Image: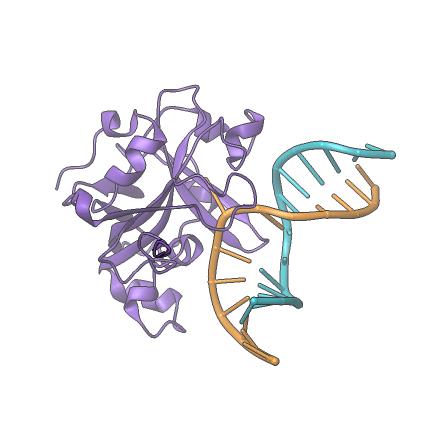
Chain colours: A purple, B orange, C cyan
Amino acid sequence: VARLPRGFFRRSSLEVAPELLGHVVARRDRSGDVLRARIVETEAYDEDDPASHSFRGVRPRTAVMFGPPGFLYVYFTYGMHWCMNVVTDAPGRGSAVLLRGAEPIDGLDAMRRRRPDVRNDAQLLAGPARWTRAFAIDRSLDGADLVRGSDVWIERGTPVPVEHVGVTERIGLRVARERPWRFVDTTSAALSRRYAGVTPRRAPARH
DNA sequence: TCCCCGATTAACT
DNA sequence: GTTAATCGGGGAG
C-alpha cells in the first residue's frame, strides 16, 4: 500500500486538512501490532493563527511544527492527554493539521485493550486524545517521519468526496474559534462532535 | 518563582 | 448544561 508522499504535506494546512479525510493512519506499536484507522476529522492550524501553538514563534515544544512537512507533532495537554498533528507546508512555516477523529480498521483488539471502558468501537478514536491513547502515541513519537518512518505513517486511502466534507468552527478554542478550519466526513459515526450541518436560517418574516 | 489556563475527557446535575 | 482531574508553557513580577 502506497504512503502519501512528502509533497502531499508540503502545502498549506488549510489545503491538507480536508484532503487528509479518507486516508489511513497506520501505527506499529511496541508489541508489533499494526493498527490502522480512516481519518474522518481534522483541523488546520497556522502561524498567523492566535489559536496555534506556533503563533508565538519557535519554542522547544513547537520546533517540529516549523520543520519539514510530513512529520508528526505530538503535544501534551490538560496534564493528561496527548494530541497528534501532521506537519504541513514548507520548512520554516509553523503549520500543522490536528488529527481529531478516525474509524478503526485494523488492530481493534489492541485498541480495545488500551480502552477497556469503551463499549462502542466507533468511539475508540473519536477525539484527539482518545485516538492517541488507543494508538499508544506519546512524546516518543514527536518528530516521527510519516513518509519514511516505521512507527507511524499515512497510507493512501479513498478521499472523501467534497459533497461529504463538512466544514465547521474548530473545537475547544477561546481564541480564533470562529475560523471554519475543522473538516469532517459528514457520513462518519466516529466524529468527536456530531456534525450539525449548515445552521438553518430563520424563515423570512411575512407581511 | 508564581499564577493562569489550555487544540480534552468523563462524570456529573 | 457544568466541573474536576492534572501538569507544562508562558507571561508577569
Q: Is residue A78 left or right of residue A100?
A: right
Q: Residue A104 sits in which quadrant?
A: bottom left
Q: Horizontal and vertical percent for residue A17?
A: 31, 38
Residue at 35 percent across and 31 percent down: it is A13
Q: Is residue A60 visible?
A: yes
Residue at 56 percent across and 45 percent down: it is A174
Q: Nearer the viewer, residue A106 or B5?
A: B5
Q: Nearer the viewer, residue A30 or A20?
A: A20
Q: Horizontal and vertical percent for residue A123?
A: 34, 65
Q: Is residue A62 visible?
A: no
Q: Horizontal and vertical percent for residue A28?
A: 28, 49
Q: Residue A7 sits in which quadrant?
A: top left
Q: Which quadrant: the N terminus of chain A?
A: top left
Q: Which quadrant: the C terminus of chain A?
A: bottom left
Residue at 20 percent across and 49 percent down: it is A164
In this view, A130 is above or below A7: below
Q: Residue furthest front?
A: A207
Q: Nearer the viewer, residue C10 or A2?
A: C10
Q: Residue A102 sits in which quadrant?
A: bottom left
